[in-house]
Amino acid sequence: MLWGVAYKISGTEDEQIALTTRCRYLEVREKQYDAKAYVDFFTDPMALTPAVSDVMVYIASSDRKLNPNYLGPASVEEIAKQIILAEGPSGPNRDYLFQLEKALIQFGFEDKHVMDLANEVRRLLSEAEVICS
C-alpha cells in the first residue's frame, strides 16, 4: 500500500529558496482542498515513532460547501467525465491523472481505481476523437 510520498529539503540557503518556491506552487495547485495539516510521517508501519514530524499535507473533504469539486459517490465513468472536463492552474486534470498512474507504476504500485479511471478517461477521449473526426 502506498499512502504518499514525502520530500525532505535540508537547510542550505538554495534549498530554502527552493522550498519557498515549491510551497508557493503547492498553495496554488492544492488550493481547492479544505485544509492543510501537519502530521507525523511513518516509513515503517510497525514503527512507534515517526520518521519525520510536521509533514505538511492537504486534505479534501466530502463537504460540498467546502469542496465544490467533490463529485460525491459516482461511477468510474462519471468520475472520468468530470476529470476530462476539469482544468486548474496547473493544467488539465487528465494530465494529473495520467502522471499519477505513471508514478504509481514506477513505485511498483498498481492502484486499481487509478488505473480504471485512467483507462476510462482514455476510452472516452478516443470516443470523442472518433466523433469529432
Image (tube, grey):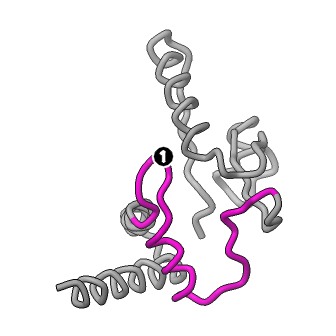
**Number of numbered discs overlaid on the protein picture:** 1
Image coordinates of residue 105 in percent, x first then y, are: 39, 69
Query: What residue is shown at x 71% (from left), y 60% (from top)?
Result: 45
Tell me if residue 47 comes above or below residue 19 in the rendering.
Answer: below
Tell me if residue 109 comes above or below residue 103 in the rendering.
Answer: below
Report if residue 106 lies within the magenta region: no
| Amino acid of disc 1 | Pro
- Quadrant for the N terminus, please: bottom right
Query: What residue is shown at x 51% (from left), y 31% (from top)?
Result: 22
Residue 105 left/right relative to 73: left
Q: Which residue is mark 1?
A: 89
Q: Quadrant of residue 4?
A: bottom right
Secondary structure found at label 1? loop
Image coordinates of residue 112 in percent, x first then y, are: 51, 83
> What span is in magenta?
66-94
Name of the residue lying farthest toward the top: 13
Image coordinates of residue 83 in percent, x first then y, are: 49, 71
Query: What residue is shown at x 72% (from left), y 62% (from top)?
Result: 68
